C-alpha cells in the first residue's frame, strides 16, 4: 500500500482547496441558474430577456434600479450612484470578465439585489437579468 507522508498530503490538500474557482462562460453560469430555478420552482418555464430588461431598468421599492449604477446601456461604463466609483461594463460582450467566476457572480447578485430589492434575488430574476445582458452587443 502506498503511503503519502503527512507533510506532502498537507501540501497537496492545501493547494487543492486554494485553487481559484474555475472560469466559466456566462452561458454556463446561466445554465447553473437555470438548474437553481428548476429546483426552486416546479412551474419554472424558462428565462425572459424582455423581463430581464424591465427588471434591470425599473426601481423595485428601494431608491435604485440596476440601471442607476450600470446605466441604461450595460455595455457602457457605469458609476456607483452613492460613491461615484467607476464600474466596468456589465454586459459580457463589453467586458469578457463578467459572469466568468461563479463566486464573484454569487457575491455580485447578493450585494446588488440587496441594494436594489432589499432582498436576495430569485433564480428567475437572476436568470432573466443575465438573459437580457447576454443580448447586449458591444
Image (cartoon, grey):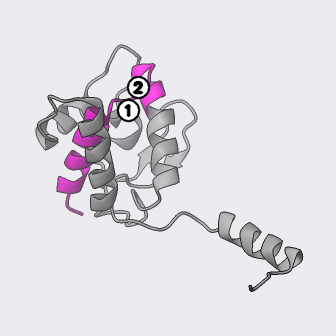
Magenta range: 113-138
Q: Which residue sits at x=47%, y=44%? A: 106
Q: Secondary structure at mark 1?
A: helix
Q: Nearer the viewer, residue 61 or 48?
A: 48
Note whether residue 35 is visible: yes
The answer to whether residue 43 is above or below residue 79 is above
The answer to whether residue 130 is above or below residue 13 is above
Q: Which mark is residue 13?
A: none
Magenta: main secondary structure? helix
Residue 68, percent across and down? 37, 32
Q: Sequence-wise, which precedes: disc 1 or disc 2?
A: 1
Q: Which mark is residue 116?
A: 2
Q: Quadrant of residue 44?
A: top left
- Give the left or right position of residue 49, taking residue 39 as reference: left
Q: Which residue sits at x=21%, y=37%? A: 52
State which quarter of the image contains the N terminus. Answer: bottom right
- Residue reaching furthest top? 61
Q: Which residue is mark 1?
A: 68
Residue 92, percent across and down? 32, 60
Q: Judge whether residue 131 is colored magenta.
A: yes
Asked if the residue at tag 2 contacts the one at tag 1, i.e. Cβ–Cβ closer than 8 Å, the answer is yes
Amino acid at each position: 500500500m502506498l503511503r503519502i507522508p503527512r507533510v506532502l498530503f498537507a501540501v497537496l490538500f492545501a493547494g487543492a482547496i486554494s485553487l481559484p474557482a474555475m472560469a466559466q462562460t456566462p452561458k454556463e453560469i446561466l445554465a447553473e441558474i437555470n438548474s437553481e430555478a428548476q429546483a426552486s420552482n416546479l412551474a419554472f418555464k424558462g428565462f425572459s430577456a424582455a423581463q430581464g430588461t424591465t427588471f434591470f431598468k425599473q426601481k423595485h421599492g428601494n431608491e435604485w434600479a440596476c440601471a442607476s449604477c450600470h446605466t441604461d446601456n450595460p455595455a457602457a461604463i457605469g458609476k456607483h450612484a452613492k460613491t461615484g466609483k467607476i464600474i466596468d461594463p456589465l454586459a459580457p460582450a463589453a467586458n469578457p470578465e463578467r459572469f466568468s467566476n461563479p463566486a464573484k457572480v454569487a457575491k455580485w447578485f447578493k450585494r446588488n439585489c440587496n441594494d436594489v430589492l432589499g432582498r436576495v434575488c430569485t433564480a428567475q430574476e437572476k436568470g432573466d437579468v443575465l438573459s437580457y445582458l447576454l443580448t447586449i452587443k458591444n
